[in-house]
């Protein structure tokens, strides 16, 4: 007679947290301002303001926007601020930086507001594999947030987790 297969992970006290579950929905956009600069390097205020005024900002509705300049131009802070003010009505979040920095900032905000009380006193696995871009910085922030309350912290999958911390 065949024995029933028992899922020991499901019946254990082990808790798994997958940051992919918290991935914010919305298109990510890298907005390069170089085309609004004279020869890609010189910001002329009057022309720059004209570009900002003529732009259809509604196309960024519910997007996450990373503002940057792909040339070595020296861009004054007010230029990014001017664009961010226009995007505020439409975008979910606007930053100055890369798409990777955008993801890192989004997850930093998510983790800072994450209620981890359900993990208190339990062994926790922070899931490693994901189909969505979970930044490494988010894993670090989450492990730091869990350390004071978790009995132990591991990384990976239940079948091959790497131990990181164990409360003594």
Image (cartoon, rainbow, N blue to C red):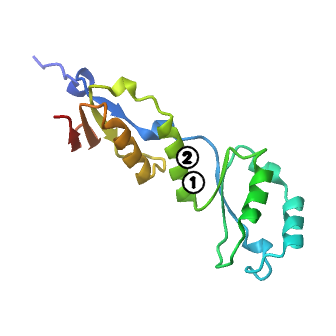
Q: Residues within 10 Å of mark 2 (few under 14, many from 20)?
A: some
Q: Position of residue 156 (x, y in %)?
A: 29, 44
Which corner quadrant holds the C terminus?
Answer: top left
Residue 89 quadrant: top right
Query: Could you give the CA–CA distance between mark 1 and mark 2, rounded to whole angstroms?
Result: 6 Å
Q: Is residue 134 above or below residue 115?
A: below
The outermost residue toward the top is 1
Rendered residue at 50%/45% (across/down):
107
Q: Inspect this view and state whether residue 96 appears.
A: yes
Q: Is residue 47 above or below residue 87?
A: below
Front residue (pair 162, 153): 153
Q: Residues within 10 Å of mark 1 (few under 14, many from 20)?
A: many
Front residue (pair 117, 133): 117
22 relative position to 25: left or right:
left
Q: Position of residue 127 (x, y in %)?
A: 34, 41
Mark 1 — residue?
Answer: 102
Rendered residue at 75%/63% (across/down):
78
The outermost residue toward the bottom is 39
Residue 118 quadrant: top left
Which corner quadrant holds the N terminus?
Answer: top left
Q: Position of residue 102 (x, y in %)?
A: 57, 54
Q: Secondary structure at mark 1?
A: helix
Rendered residue at 55%/46% (across/down):
106
Q: Position of residue 88 (x, y in %)?
A: 75, 47
Residue 106 is marked as: 2
83 relative position to 124: left or right:
right
Rendered residue at 73%/73% (across/down):
34
Q: Are marks 1 and 2 in contact (CB under 8 Å)?
A: yes
Q: Secondary structure at mark 2?
A: helix
Residue 69 quadrant: bottom right
Residue 160 is marked as: none
């Amino acid at each position: 007679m065949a024995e029933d297969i028992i899922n020991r992970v499901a019946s254990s006290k082990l808790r798994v947290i997958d940051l992919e579950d918290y991935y914010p929905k919305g298109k990510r956009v890298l907005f390069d301002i170089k085309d609004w600069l004279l020869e890609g390097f010189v910001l002329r205020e009057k022309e720059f303001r004209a570009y900002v005024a003529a732009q259809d900002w509604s196309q960024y509705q519910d997007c996450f926007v990373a503002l940057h300049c792909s040339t070595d131009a020296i861009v004054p802070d007010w230029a990014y601020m001017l664009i961010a003010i226009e995007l505020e009505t439409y975008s979910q979040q606007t930053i100055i930086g890369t798409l990777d920095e955008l993801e890192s900032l989004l997850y930093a905000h998510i983790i800072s507001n994450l209620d981890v009380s359900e993990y208190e006193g339990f062994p926790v696995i922070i899931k490693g594999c994901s189909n969505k871009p979970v930044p490494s910085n988010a894993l670090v922030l989450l492990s730091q947030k869990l350390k004071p309350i978790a009995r132990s912290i591991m990384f990976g999958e239940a079948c091959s987790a790497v131990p990181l911390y164990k409360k003594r």
